[in-house]
Image (cartoon, coloured by chain):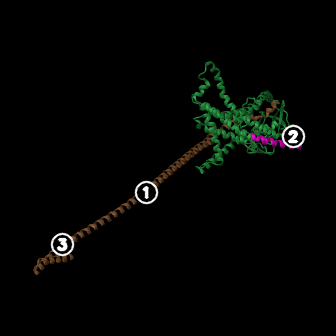
Amino acid sequence: MRIRTTGILTCLMLALSWPLWAQHEGGQHTAAAHEAEAATEEHAQEGEAHHATCSCEPKEEGEFDVAAVAFHHIGDANAFHIWGDIYFPLPVMLYDRQGGKWDVMMSSRFDYKHNHGNGRKAINRYVLVEGVVYRVADEHFPAEEVQVDCVSETEHEGEKHPAIVYKGQCYELEAKTTWDGGFTGGGPTSFYDFSITKNVFTMLLVFFLLGWMFVSVRKAYQKRQGMAPTGLQNLVELMIMFIQEEVAKPFIGKHYFRYMPFLISLFFFILALNLIGQIPFFPGSGNVTGNISATAGLALVTAFRVYTSANKHYWEHVFWMPGVPAWVKVILTPVEMLGLLIKPFTLMLRLFANITAGHVVLISFVGLIFIFGKMGESIAGATAGIFSAFVLNGFMMAIEVLVALIQAFVFTLLAASYLGDATQEAH
Amino acid sequence: MDAMFLSGFTVIRPEPGLLFWTIVIFVAFWLTVGRGIIRMIANMMKEREEGIQRSLDEAKRVREEMQQLQAQNEDLLAQAQEERTQILAQAKAAKDSIISEAREQAKEEARRIISTAKEQIENMKTGAIIELKNQVGSIALEVAAKVLEKDLASDAQQVEFVEKLVNEMELN
């Protein structure tokens, strides 16, 4: 039974992971675009700083870009969008790579009030665009706090980039440093963003919510000592027992209890983040497990836990598989060593792809309202859009809750199976 | 088009800040809440297990006690029954013995009375015989005196006279 369930889950995971691979291949095209961007920066340094074109003129209403809206919604931000024009300010901690200088403040200092999350101020070249911190690429831009004219955008080969207008001149912006090597359109820039972003805020919220849950369960336990569990206490106990009986014991075996805190933490943390991301309004909506940095963090901690608890027997099997001919070992060892990297890598990708795919689909359905309504021209179309979005999203959210549970479970299950492999005794 | 599609897709770009915070928050969560909850649940389970075991043991003990009590009751009942039959038997025996004793006593009494009567009769008989002997003696003396007084004329008369005396004596 268990094998069949795992098989079904694997198929489901593969199916849900597919869109990611499709996007991944698409990512290679951006490498060229990135080079073009780099070329622009070089030009800027040569003194032709202001050849970029943008203005504060209200731009023409183009076609509704569902992808852009969806990506903006699932992305991280330095100010938490609550409703309409209202943003919740968050602490900003920025590190200037060149100057080695920290800038620590609240994002409200960018003065974004009633301006759609766009800051009216530039501080040490940092600006806020739709609640996200960017930095003016031009090093000659004034480092002190200055008033900017407006937030705009430039266009290179069909790709739009945020920009600002300062004293009538257009300045291109660069995003925070990412470690994708330009592979997916990011790369190293002049600053790191260590802020308490929307995602970090959501994680802290989940930490305290689960901590509160733990305390209330402990209280319930003390109050109802020796009695049958009820309510939250029962639910938490049920989930923990499920992880213990269905995941930890069968996959790890004898020493399962040593790894229970880790597995339970993984399961509850991921589940809570998945679910809180489904809530479409503040303080929900933070898409943490749909962000590869967060899933990479979880995968790295898991890899650390697995490889630090691995025994001699495991390393022997990785580096010099006993009982096979030497020439097979030559092939096997690199494969096994690659496996050490692939395991956390798949953990990272699977969770990220599943959650992101769900969010993109949900937001796209909401986008139907604007597409059918032709940006407010057709009220009948908008009504049809609202209706279809309502039906489709009801269906999708039900599936997403299921996905939230399954992905939390799968992550925990795979972590347990890696732990089981690593701690298996010689047989 | 693909490039544009990805231009805003920031979630796929691994970013040191969020990575750092995820690791910090998750590890903190693991070491505090994760450890705490598992320790608590383990304690809870252990205590509950012990509690259930205690209850089961208690139930078993009570059941055994009940069985013991029942056995004891049955024993007592059997004992009482036996005692009853014993008492009845004893009573019967006592009754029988009393009756036979009484009968024996009665017989003895009767025997004693009879023997006393016999003795008395014997005594009276002896007394009567003694008296008779005495009377016969005195009669004989009287007769002898009368004979001697009368001087008996003839033998016939003498005989007649003796017979007459004897008859008189027998009448006595």
The answer to whether tags 2 and 3 share a subunit is: no
Count of numbered labels shown in the rendering:
3
Residue A389 within the segment the image draws in magenta: yes
| Mark 3 surroundings: few (<14), some (14-19) or many (≥20) residues within 10 A | few
Q: Which mark is residue A372?
A: 2
- Please give the letter of the chain rendered in green: A
Task: Kindly state the secondary structure of the residue where label 1 is placed.
Answer: helix
| Label 2 secondary element | helix
Question: How far, Cα to Cα, is label 1 from label 2?
Answer: 106 Å
Looking at the image, the residue that sits furthest to the top is A327
- Residue B130 is labelled as 3
**Boundaries of the magenta span:** A379-399
Q: Please, what is the dominant secondary structure of the magenta stretch?
A: helix
Res. B130 image quadrant: bottom left
Q: Residue furthest right?
A: A377
Residue at the image point whose x is 62% and y is 36% from the top: A248
Task: Tell me which chain the residue with mark 1 is part of.
Answer: B
Image quadrant where one finds the C terminus of chain A: top right
User: Which chain is brown in the picture?
Assistant: B
